[in-house]
């Protein structure tokens, strides 16, 4: 077992079981390691299984076993040990020390061990540290507790921080998700002088190059189809400069081939993009595939764009419910309502749209065909076209919210619920 120990609050402090979601949000994805957890209680078994599903654990090979320290010792007598062993313990301290000595005889020297115990005993903690235990956690534990502890052992605290990733997706085709993604990327880079990478993931029909009046010879296709070449230098060659602090990975927007991707296709690209810029904006096409689901599971924030009609309401409900299940330890996706107030188009009122979703929109963008059409046809952003327009101010506020510089204020919910029955599942 490893002789390294971790004690974030000093030698005499035990880890508080109440993990904080905000702290979890700041953690880097864990590296490719193997973990086996031995659980004596059903509660801990459930926590470990949920922990294995967290997006920060995507690269971890995680296995849970219904057993104890003795079970682990017997297992590793005939099989190699993983990078980390997590053990729930209910035996008295003296017996625990004897069993740990037996485990040490069958463990690889590099294997680290975390014990989840039920004794709030500082002397026990000190003895375990001297035995080479990496951490002792007092039960009950949460998912956040476990991921924080694992990260403290395997993630280099001196490593460069990863950039924030924000995925934009439309609840339905034609709702303006790409336009909003492009304006937000431009706004973040311009308002805060922050380097931003905009990645157009719609390789067949992407519009980022048109909206920024660019025609780069290379872009995201080269990165996706040549992952073995992908490094910082290669990425720089593929990026097209759109503004002082904004670079773009443009889509080829050609149909000379099909774009059938597997679940992990975009994983290498996301890893290097996160290391290359403080903020990355991903323009995700309106489709539901293994790879789009994987991308939205991995990012820090998801923004769903919808227009106020019934099909959008149904699709938004499905998207929000699914993404919340995929990302149980992250903030709920954000909702942007677009094209609100289109003349002669019947619309669902904002209260009726949001009430069954149990969410308040992060931004509401009024329909303005002249402003958006002018910006699109000239290859400029809304704030460049008319900086004094109310929509430009909305994009500015959205940029502040998505970068954590401001938070939305919840308005009082209405009691209207006449659309809830349309969304109830049988």
Image (cartoon, rainbow, N blue to C red):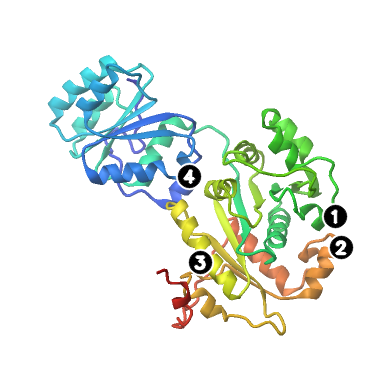
16 up-or-down from 74: above or below: below
Which of the 4 image quarters holds residue 78?
A: top left
Cα gap from disc 1 to disc 3, whole angstroms: 35 Å
Q: Earlier in the sequence, mark 1 or mark 2?
A: 1
The disc at residue 172 is: none
**Nearest to viewer (mark 4 / mark 3):** 3
Question: Are discs 1 and 2 less than 8 Å apart at CB?
Answer: yes
Q: Nearer the viewer, residue 15 or 144?
A: 144
> Mark 1 falls on what kind of element?
loop
Numbered badge on residue 213: 1
Q: Is residue 372 above or below residue 189?
A: below
User: Who comes first in sequence, dot 1 or dot 3?
Assistant: 1
Is residue 327 visible to the viewer in this orientation of the structure? no
Dot 3: what SS?
helix
Q: Which residue is mark 2?
A: 378
Query: Looking at the image, is mark 3 or mark 2 earlier in the sequence?
Result: 3
- State which mark lies toward you, 3 or 2: 3
Residue 304 % position (x, y): 59, 62
Q: Residue at x 85, y 64 (%)?
A: 377
Residue shown at 22% from the left, 22% from the top? 100
Residue 187 against residue 240 in the figure, above or below: below
């Amino acid at each position: 077992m490893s002789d390294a120990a971790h004690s974030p609050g000093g030698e005499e402090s035990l880890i508080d079981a109440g993990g904080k979601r905000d702290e979890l949000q700041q953690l880097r994805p864990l590296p490719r390691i193997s973990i086996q957890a031995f659980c004596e209680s059903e509660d801990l078994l459930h926590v470990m299984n949920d922990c294995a599903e967290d997006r920060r654990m995507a690269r971890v090979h995680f296995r849970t076993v219904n057993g104890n320290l003795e079970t682990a010792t017997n297992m590793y007598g005939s099989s190699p040990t993983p990078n980390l062993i997590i053990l729930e313990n209910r035996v008295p301290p003296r017996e625990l020390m004897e069993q740990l000595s037996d485990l040490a005889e069958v463990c690889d020297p590099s294997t680290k061990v975390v014990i989840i115990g039920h004794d709030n005993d500082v002397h026990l903690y000190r003895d375990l540290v001297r035995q080479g235990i990496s951490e002792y956690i007092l039960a009950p534990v949460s998912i956040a507790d476990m991921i924080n502890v694992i990260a403290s052992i395997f993630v280099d605290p001196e490593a460069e921080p990863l950039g924030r990733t924000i995925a934009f997706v439309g609840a339905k085709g034609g709702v303006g998700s790409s336009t909003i993604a492009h304006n937000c990327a431009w706004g973040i880079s311009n308002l805060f002088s922050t380097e931003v990478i905009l990645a157009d993931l719609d390789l067949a029909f992407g519009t980022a190059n048109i909206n920024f009046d660019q025609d780069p010879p290379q872009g995201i296709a080269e990165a996706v189809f040549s992952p073995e070449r992908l490094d910082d230098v290669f990425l720089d060659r593929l990026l097209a400069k759109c503004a002082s602090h904004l670079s773009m990975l443009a889509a080829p927007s050609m149909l000379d081939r099909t774009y059938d991707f597997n679940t992990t296709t975009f994983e290498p690209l996301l890893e290097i993009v996160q290391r290359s810029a403080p903020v990355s904006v991903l323009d995700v096409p309106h489709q539901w595939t293994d790879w789009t689901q994987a991308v939205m599971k991995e990012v820090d924030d998801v923004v769903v764009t919808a227009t106020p009609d019934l099909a959008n309401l149904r699709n938004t409900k499905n998207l929000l419910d699914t993404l919340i299940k995929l990302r149980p330890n992250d903030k709920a996706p954000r909702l942007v309502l677009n094209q609100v107030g289109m003349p002669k188009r019947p619309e669902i009122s904002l209260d009726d749209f949001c009430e069954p979703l149990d969410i308040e929109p992060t931004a509401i963008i009024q329909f303005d065909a002249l402003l958006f059409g002018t910006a699109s046809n000239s290859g400029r952003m809304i704030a460049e076209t008319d900086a004094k327009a109310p929509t430009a101010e909305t994009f500015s506020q959205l940029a502040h919210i998505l970068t954590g510089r401001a938070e939305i204020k919840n308005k009082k919910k209405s009691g209207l619920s006449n659309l809830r029955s349309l969304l109830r599942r049988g």
